Image (spheres, rainbow, N blue to C red):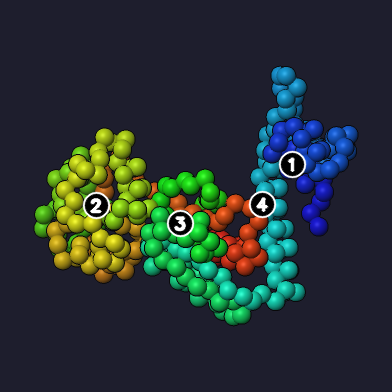
Amino acid sequence: MLDFRLQVFYTVAKRLNFTKAAAELYISQPAVTKHIKELEGVYKTSLFERSGNKKIILTAAGKTLLQYADQLLDIYRELEFDMNLLVKQHSGVLRIGASTTVAQYIIPPVLAQFHKKFKDIQVHLVTGNTEDIEQALIKKEIEFGIIEGVSRNPQIKYEEYLKDELVLVCAGNNISLKKDTIKPEELKNYPLLLREPGSGTLDVIAHALKPHHIKLSDLQVEMQLGGTESIKSYLLHSNCLAFLSIHSILKELKNNECRIIDIKDLTIERPFHIIQPHGQPSSLSELFSRFARNQAKQ
């Protein structure tokens, strides 16, 4: 078990309030103070100091201890979870949704490793664009999803899963664009391939271009296609440009089939998000969520 004094410190450090921490931990405020004093005695330094209006703030030592406490609590949560796995038999059907980029390039290796470890769990994967997956979750057609994009539906709980970057790409033999860097406004001068309406990728691109006063309607959109593979195939047989996930073009970059065009002062980063309904997730959904997070760290 984690030292309870460290749990008390962590709660106070997060709330910066002894009274709230005591209520959250179901102990008295004097008990909270006692545990903090004991920790300060162990480390021979103050962990909190008073500021104006009876507020408390972390000292330099307190900030350092909080960093380690965060790591230790994560380790103990994983330990508890893994120990429970040893005594529980998991079986059943888990319905997962994944937006197109995630389904093609991110989730398949995770699913393969998950199946090796939990052979009695059947996983059904539903794919579609971000909007499709969100709607499937709301309609309870799936219990869990991983999506791209910047959507924020109040009916859904979003948790960041993995970082991604959208890069501007052209075919390796594209003769219309010989330079490797362009200005944002130069995007208007080249034919572009974009994803279909409702795509999380499309939303991210539109959001990133907005500070540069560029709308999607300003661009020369040659065609909108319903998937990354379709865009890649078209791209390699044309002089078009396209924004694609870096995860989706690793093989093509290695084989010099395509190249990245840098855009001055424009980087398009996005997180993939795990989405679940609000409230307590099902045991299988929680199991897969933890497994996927651990795989992402490796």
Structural distance between the alpha carbons of marks 4 and 2:
39 Å
Which badge, 4 or 2, is on the more N-terminal residue? Answer: 4
The residue wearing badge 3 is: 135
* Mark 4 surroundings within 10 Å by alpha-carbon count, few (fewer than 14), some (14 through 19), many (20 or more): few
Residue 257 versus residue 195 in the image, above or below: below
Please tell me whether mark 1 sits on a helix, a strand or a loop.
helix
Q: Left or right: 99 with respect to 214?
A: right
Residue toward you, 266 or 90: 90
Structural distance between the alpha carbons of marks 1 and 3:
36 Å
Name the residue type under label 4. Answer: Gln
Could you tell me which residue is drawn at 20 percent across and 65 percent down?
Answer: 234
* Mark 1 surroundings within 10 Å by alpha-carbon count, few (fewer than 14), some (14 through 19), many (20 or more): many
* Mark 3 surroundings within 10 Å by alpha-carbon count, few (fewer than 14), some (14 through 19), many (20 or more): some
The residue wearing badge 4 is: 71
Comparing marks 1 and 2, which lies closer to the viewer?
A: 1
Which badge, 4 or 3, is on the more N-terminal residue? Answer: 4
Could you tell me which residue is drawn at 65 percent across and 65 percent down?
Answer: 283
Residue 123 versus residue 21 in the image, above or below: below
Structural distance between the alpha carbons of marks 1 and 2:
47 Å
The residue wearing badge 1 is: 11
Structural distance between the alpha carbons of marks 3 and 2:
35 Å
The residue wearing badge 2 is: 261
Q: Left or right: 293 with respect to 221?
A: right
Which badge, 1 or 2, is on the more N-terminal residue? Answer: 1
Name the residue type under label 3. Answer: Gln
Could you tell me which residue is drawn at 76 percent across and 35 percent down?
Answer: 20
Which badge, 3 or 2, is on the more N-terminal residue? Answer: 3
User: Which label number is shown at residue 61?
Assistant: none
Residue 12 versus residue 293 in the image, above or below: above
Which badge, 1 or 3, is on the more N-terminal residue? Answer: 1
Could you tell me which residue is drawn at 22 percent across and 47 percent down?
Answer: 181
Residue toward you, 55 or 178: 55
